[in-house]
Image (cartoon, grey):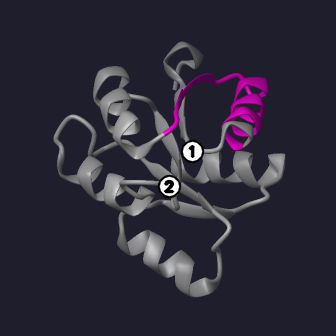
């Protein structure tokens, strides 16, 4: 993938989590766009067509699972891989995240290595 087309959309209702994830991705050479809610993420995904989406699960209003299911049925966004990010990351949570359409689930707090590994796995 050409670096100019590598864009990640980071979705989290917590500004500090968005900033941390954005820094990790930008340092890895990715262009980063952010959204503070699932509804905003759906709009940005359709408009910007990112290469990958890092999506928090627990957010006010629509949660990350609902947003992922909506992305999956939209022809404009269904091919975009989603990596869930959550404080809930037990084995059952990982299975459920995959059932909702996610490519991976990384736990909070996350490390640079976890983000980059998920990026390599999901973006292939």
Residue 34: image x %, image y %? 54, 29
Q: Nearer the viewer, residue 43 or 113?
A: 43
Badge 1 is on which residue?
13
For residue 49, side relative to residue 11 (left or right) = left
Badge 2 is on which residue?
59
Residue 119 lies in quadrant: top right
For residue 107, side relative to residue 27 (left or right) = left
Identify the mark nearer the N-term, 1 or 2: 1
Query: What residue sits 62% from the left and 63% below the top?
Result: 86
Residue 4: image x %, image y %? 54, 13
Q: Which residues are magenta?
A: 17-36
As displayed, is residue 43 above or below residue 101? Answer: above
In magenta segment, residue 30: yes
Q: Secondary structure at mark 2?
A: loop
Query: What residue sits 27% from the left and 39% below the top?
Result: 77
For residue 113, side relative to residue 59 (left or right) = right
Query: What residue sits 37% from the left and 42% below the top?
Result: 80
Query: What residue sits 43% from the left and 71% below the top?
Result: 98
Q: Are marks 1 and 2 in contact (CB under 8 Å)?
A: yes
**Could you classify mark 1 by the number of other residues whose Cα lies within 10 Å: few (under 14), some (14-19), or many (20 or more)?**
some
Instruction: State how far apart marks 1 and 2 are (Cα).
Output: 6 Å
Q: Residue furthest front?
A: 60
As displayed, is residue 110 above or below residue 119? Answer: below
Q: Residue furthest top?
A: 4
In magenta segment, residue 20: yes
């Amino acid at each position: 993938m050409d670096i100019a087309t590598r864009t990640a959309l980071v979705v989290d209702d917590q500004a500090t989590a968005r900033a941390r994830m954005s820094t990790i991705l930008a340092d890895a050479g990715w262009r980063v766009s952010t959204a503070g809610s699932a509804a905003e993420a759906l709009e940005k995904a359709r408009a910007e067509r990112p290469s990958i989406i890092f999506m928090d699960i627990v957010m006010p209003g629509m949660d990350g699972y609902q947003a992922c299911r909506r992305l999956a049925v939209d022809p404009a966004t269904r091919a975009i891989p989603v990596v869930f990010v959550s404080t809930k990351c037990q084995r059952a949570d990982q299975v459920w995240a995959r059932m909702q359409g996610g490519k991976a689930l990384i736990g909070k707090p996350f490390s640079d290595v976890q983000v980059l590994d998920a990026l390599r796995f999901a973006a292939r």
